[in-house]
Image (cartoon, rainbow, N blue to C red):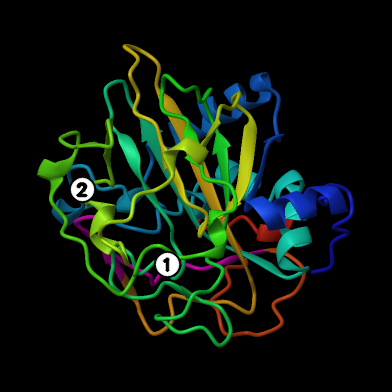
Amino acid sequence: MTLDTQQWQLSETELEFFREHGYIGPLTIYTPEEMDALWRRARRETLDRSHAAYPVDEAMSGATNIANYDRHLDVDLLMQHVCNRKITDRAASILGPNVLCWRTEFFPKYPGDEGTDWHQADTFANASGKPQILWPGETDTEFGKGTLTVWTAFTDATRENGCLQVIPGSHHRMNYDETKRMNYDTAQINSKVKDGVPRGFFGYDYRELQIDPDWKPSEEDAFDLVMQRGQCVIFWSTLMHASLPNITAKSHRMGFATRYVPTSVRVYPGTDRVEEYGGSIPLDKWGAVLVSGEDDTGHNKILRESLRGTPVSEFLS
């Protein structure tokens, strides 16, 4: 697959900003009206799980989000979003020409929901205890680059309803040890205040992974990513990021994260299941999606069509 990745690539000025700060955005991918139409249709389609990659059972009940990983694999509108050239051209300008999307996740925040803990992710062993991505030569005890996350606001994201926050430049140092394990307890949800802000991590306390237990994030350096629906932010997962609580009575915030790596990165090495957030999902239907360039390594499972049978090539034109 050969695509011209010039149209939406980042400029050298934008790349310089990204290298220094670890993020760039907000960037407009859709108009608000386009985003409203996409999300209205996709929301209905997500209700049909007949082709979803992961089954829902009692092990995935409650607050866990794991059952809603990777809905782009069975909802073609979300696959179209994953392959959107306004996103993938920019991703390729950072990662190189050969790019995979290996995961997507919904991040809803309802009125009254707590904010999300400050955190970083490199190998994504933070909850499952096992590396989910490894860069060439990286081990689970070394500091790599993590993944390139594109977080798109499917609804408006405001300070009041729980927008993202980042600490610019913090991607150069890892403050957490992902080889440690966190204690999963749904009783922690909406129950803790950290440095004056209600925060949690979907049933975990991310502070349990701190390398220095007395260290605290520099909240005074945080930047609030207020975004209009249809806009996105691109950032390294190793960048310190969090979200504010939703203090509104009626405003529902929905974010959708797409995660990209070069084809040289090993995804889910040596595992056929993911266990985290109180759930367990089999990876037999999972596959990475080649969104740019060529699969030049052959060590990852690549899906050539969606789980509904639509060729991926149709989303890449």
**Three-letter amino acid code at the position of disc 1:** Lys
Q: Which residue is mark 2?
A: 203
- Determine whether 137 is above or below 102 in the image: below
| Residue 285: mark | 1
- Determine whether 70 is above or below 223 in the image: below
Q: Give the crowd class for mark 2: few <14, some 14-19, many >=20 residues within 10 Å.
A: many
Q: Give the crowd class for mark 1: few <14, some 14-19, many >=20 residues within 10 Å.
A: few
Magenta residue check for 281: yes
Q: Which of the two residues, 291 or 178, is positioned nearer the viewer here?
A: 178
Left or right: 241 as drawn, with respect to 248: right
Distance from label 2 to label 1 (Cα)? 27 Å
- Determine whether 182 is above or below 166 in the image: below
Q: Residue at x 52, y 45 (%)?
A: 167
Q: Residue at x 47, y 30 (%)?
A: 163
Q: Residue furthest top?
A: 249
Nearer to us: label 2 or label 1:
2
How far from the left and from the top, in percent, is residue 169? Answer: 59, 53
Quadrant of the image occupied by residue 233: top right
Q: Residue at x 42, y 19 (%)?
A: 160
Q: Residue at x 35, y 77 (%)?
A: 272
Left or right: 223 as drawn, with respect to 62: right
| Mark 1 residue element | loop
Tell me which label, 2 or 1, sits earlier in the chain: 2
The answer to whether residue 275 is seen in the rendering is yes
How far from the left and from the top, in percent, is residue 207? Answer: 26, 54
Magenta residue check for 104: no
Q: Residue furthest left?
A: 187
**Three-letter amino acid code at the position of disc 2:** Gly
State which region is magenta. 274-290
